């Protein structure tokens, strides 16, 4: 995402539309209002490396001065929770949806942006393709003052996180929690407690967080996904850099567990 104030400690801000007008864009998508100003997502066709041979002329696809690219995770960390971050998330998910639905998934025909609702409409069969959100559950399993953390195969050494996975077709959120915990770490849980949710644009998840009480079984990891899972006492958790960042719902679940138990 292009932001003003791309590096350093200052809070990044959005570009204005006039700064982007001369750039090639695949789409301009309405996002709603922020502080009384109309916001749009512009899906730019840029060449961030600046090394593409561009027939339309030198420099035309380069990033405008004063703006710099910033990763989504970086923006989560730098913007904090608030309406601007929410707009960033919405912009990312809308552009992802727009680019992924150029053709109808039902008949293969080309789609066009609907003029009456936020959808891409198939010109051939009329099917509407709306922005797609994928629900996923993330669960903090607790046993007294211990919490169950797991290492995914792709994690760097020493990093632990919570059990998480997509909700499957036909499932409730609660069923997904029981299934995911059972599949990934082999234990049973009860007393599910809703914690909160978070839009997570990697690319378009809705993360739904739960606390769940350990109810039985031995840890047995799903080896295709998880390399290790173990109990951590609340006073001996992995260091903050070795567990989910505080801006993620996983980090907030762990902080919520700490707040409940650390003082006794
Ligand atoms: Zn179609």
Image (cartoon, rainbow, N blue to C red):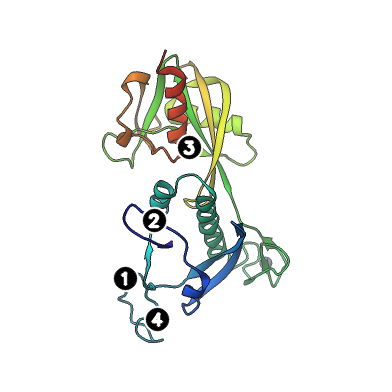
* The one of 5 and 135 positioned closer to us in this rendering: 5
Relative vertical location of residue 79 with respect to residue 46 in this rendering, above or below: above
Q: Secondary structure at mark 3?
A: helix
Q: Earlier in the sequence, mark 2 or mark 3?
A: 2
Residue 242 x, y percent position in the rendering: 31, 35
Q: Earlier in the sequence, mark 2 or mark 4?
A: 4
Q: Is residue 107 left or right of residue 253?
A: right
Q: Earlier in the sequence, mark 2 or mark 1?
A: 1
How many numbered callouts?
Answer: 4
Q: Is residue 201 left or right of residue 153?
A: right
The CA distance from mark 2 to mark 1 is: 15 Å
Q: Which residue is mark 1?
A: 49
Within 10 Å of the Cα at label 2, are there few (<14), some (14-19), or many (20+) other Cα atoms?
few
Rendered image quadrant of residue 186: top left
Q: Secondary structure at mark 1?
A: loop
Does residue 235 show up? yes
The CA distance from mark 4 to mark 1 is: 13 Å
Q: Which residue is mark 4?
A: 60
Q: Earlier in the sequence, mark 3 or mark 4?
A: 4
Q: Which residue is mark 3?
A: 249
């Amino acid at each position: 995402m292009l932001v003003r104030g791309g590096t350093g400690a200052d809070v990044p801000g959005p570009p204005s539309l006039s700064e982007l007008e001369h750039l090639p864009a695949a789409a301009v998508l309405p996002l709603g209002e922020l502080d009384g100003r109309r916001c749009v997502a512009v899906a730019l066709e840029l060449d961030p490396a600046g090394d593409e041979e561009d027939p339309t002329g030198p420099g035309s696809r380069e990033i405008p001065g004063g703006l710099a690219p910033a990763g989504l995770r970086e923006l989560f960390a730098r913007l904090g929770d608030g309406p601007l971050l929410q707009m960033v998330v919405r912009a990312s998910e809308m552009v992802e949806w727009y680019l992924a639905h150029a053709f109808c998934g039902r008949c293969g025909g080309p789609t066009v942006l609907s003029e009456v609702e936020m959808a891409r409409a198939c010109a051939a069969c009329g099917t509407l393709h709306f922005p797609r959100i994928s629900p996923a559950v993330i669960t903090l399993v607790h046993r007294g003052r211990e919490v169950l953390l797991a290492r995914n195969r792709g994690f760097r050494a020493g990093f632990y996180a919570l059990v998480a996975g997509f909700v499957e077709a036909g499932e409730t959120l609660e069923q997904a929690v029981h299934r995911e915990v059972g599949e990934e770490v082999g234990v049973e849980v009860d007393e599910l407690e809703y914690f909160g949710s978070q839009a997570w644009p990697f690319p378009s998840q809705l993360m739904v967080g739960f606390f769940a009480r350990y109810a039985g079984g031995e840890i047995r990891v799903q080896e295709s996904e998880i390399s290790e899972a173990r109990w951590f006492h609340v006073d001996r958790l992995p260091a903050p850099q070795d567990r989910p960042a505080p801006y993620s719902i996983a980090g907030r679940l762990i902080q919520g567990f700490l707040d409940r138990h650390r003082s006794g």
